[in-house]
Image (cartoon, rainbow, N blue to C red):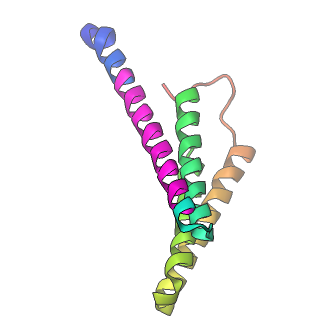
Amino acid sequence: MNLYRQYGSKLLKLTENLVLLIIAIATVAAIGQEISHIINMGKVQLADLLLLFIYLEVLAMVANYAESGKLPVRMPLYIAIVALARYLILDMKSMDDWRILAISLSTVVLAGTVIVIRWGQLKMPYPKNQEYDN
């Protein structure tokens, strides 16, 4: 157990930071590719903006996690909502009605989940002097 305390936790933290850096670099590269695509096409479409927004949310999530060591559940939910909206925008013409309804309901469920989580944070916060993340 002493060996883990001395080296294991440091190695895990180093690995975590390395993976966060890789995610950040890959996201910045994807942003660059998307901007290059927009320039080559000569026009900006709503789907392009939504994809850039998804990338921005991923970067914000990485930054938040790097700073606080905690990952708010709401951030991936926001990303999922925008991804579903983008999917609807891109493929709506080729989708049948049931698929559109299912994706729309999924988006509403995700939005409701965000509201419930936020309400819980405001109305039932953790005690300030108690740490739950050990």
**Is residue 23 or residue 104 the one in the foreground?**
23
Quadrant including the N terminus: top left
Q: Where are the magenta residues, as a range? A: 14-38
Q: Which residue in the rendered view is the most extreme toward the right?
A: 123
User: Magenta includes 91?
Assistant: no
Q: Position of residue 64 (x, y in %)?
A: 58, 35
Give the tally of numbered discs.
0
Q: Is residue 59 above or below residue 11?
A: below
Q: Position of residue 59 (x, y in %)?
A: 55, 42
Q: Is residue 33 above or below residue 109?
A: above
Q: Is residue 132 visible?
A: no
Question: Which residue is drawn at the image coordinates 42% and 27% (left, top)?
Answer: 17
Q: Is residue 83 above or below residue 57?
A: below
Question: Which residue is drawn at the image coordinates 54% and 67% (left, top)?
Answer: 41
Q: Position of residue 76 (x, y in %)?
A: 53, 52
Question: Which residue is drawn at the image coordinates 51% and 92% (left, top)?
Answer: 97
**Is residue 119 or residue 61 the one in the foreground?**
61
Name which quarter of the figure residue 18 lies in. top left
User: Magenta includes 22?
Assistant: yes
Q: Position of residue 57 (x, y in %)?
A: 58, 49
Q: Is residue 20 visible?
A: yes
Residue 2 placement, left or right of 98: left
Name which quarter of the figure residue 121 lies in. top right
Q: Is residue 60 above or below residue 112?
A: above
